Image (tube, helix red, strand yellow):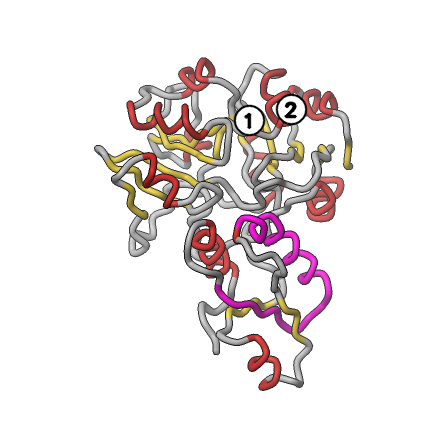
Amino acid sequence: MITHSIQDIIDVLKKGDIAGIPTETVYGLGANGLDEKAVQKIFTVKGRPNKNPLILHTHSFKELKKLVKHISPIAKNLANFYWPGPLTILFEKSDLVSDLITAGSSKVAIRIPSHPMFLEILKSVDFPIAAPSANPYQSISPTTAQQVDDYFKEKVPFVLDGGQCDSGLESTIVGIEKDTIIIYRLGGITIESLKKFHPKVALYKKENTKVVTSGMDLKHYAPKTKLLVVDNIKDYIKKHSNLNIGVLEFKETDNKSIAKEFYHRLYQLDQQNFDLIITTKFKNIGIGKALNDKLQRASYTERES
């Protein structure tokens, strides 16, 4: 059920249930991050394997310190610069954090979000909130309350309507290894931005298939309709005139504006019973790198001309 009452969400979370929560990235499926029964509901409702870690959300450094063993100088500087906002940082977890959250890892992913409604909720409860994207496992991430309600109906008591998400892409997830920032998931904070902040930045090696944190599955963010990334949209449609083809394209010229609409447009196309959806790659700079990463994971085949 869609609600406009923040108190509805607070009450549900305090009772140990789950709720749909708006963030600046995508809508999250939230639960008390210190209550294992509540956290397990997230995995069950999403159909998400327990081997996939969750992100914890909090509202202050004071609360952060309860959840981690140590905050390195680089991590502290990153948090000071990018929080509240779409950057998630990996820390060595404290004993307060359950292995269910981290999938048995010693590291926990945490961020302070910037969405005012989410921050108000976090300040009104005495626990961090675990909140992966509010979608069935491997499906398109939702950027509106209606999409969340369409996905889960009565399985989720309340979905708070906070409008369409500003960023439209998941948070960037980073860890600190010695003096290097390792990017585990591309998202709203770009590689270029991180490199301006700190000179040593590297992408997590793709050949390493271990799931360290959220969003690392090879297949992810996928529509029910087959999605293909093609070289030329007009040529592909001409060659396959027998098919009912949906086209994912954008009038917006900058990648930041495209990112806000990306999942929303893909979700809308997925509701229209096309034989397949086609699109092309984005300019591989800035947020375009994150968009291309989402396309690769969402498409059934990496490339088709």
Place of residue 113 in the rendered image (x, y in percent of width and height, measured from the top left): 54, 29
**Residue 42 in picture, x, y percent from top left:** 58, 37
Pointer 1 or 2: first along the chain: 2
Task: Decide which of 19, 155 is in the foreground and name it.
Answer: 19
Q: Which residue is mark 2?
A: 13
Other residues around mark 2 within 10 Å, as few (<14) / some (14–19) / many (≥20):
many
The residue under label 1 is which amino acid type? Ile
Residue 235 found in image quarter: bottom right
Q: Which mark is residue 129?
A: 1
Count of numbered tags: 2
Tell me whether circle 1 and circle 2 mark residues in contact (CB < 8 Å): yes
Say if 52 sits above or below 68 in the image. below
Determine whether the residue tagged by mark 1 lies in a helix, strand or loop.
strand
Image height of 23 relative to 216, above or below: above
Q: Is residue 268 magenta?
A: yes
Q: Position of residue 225 (x, y in %)?
A: 62, 66
Q: With respect to residue 168, does 41 lie above or below?
A: above
Residue at 52% x, 59% y is: 298
Magenta part of the chain = 256-281
How many C-alpha atoms fall within 10 Å of the one at disc 1: few (<14), some, or many (≥20)? many
Side of 121 relative to 36 (left or right) = right
Magenta stretch holds residue 239: no
Check the image and report above or below for 173 versus 293. above
* Residue type at the position of mark 2: Leu
Who's the residue at 52% across and 76% down the image?
Answer: 232
Distance, label 1 to label 2, CA atoms, is 9 Å
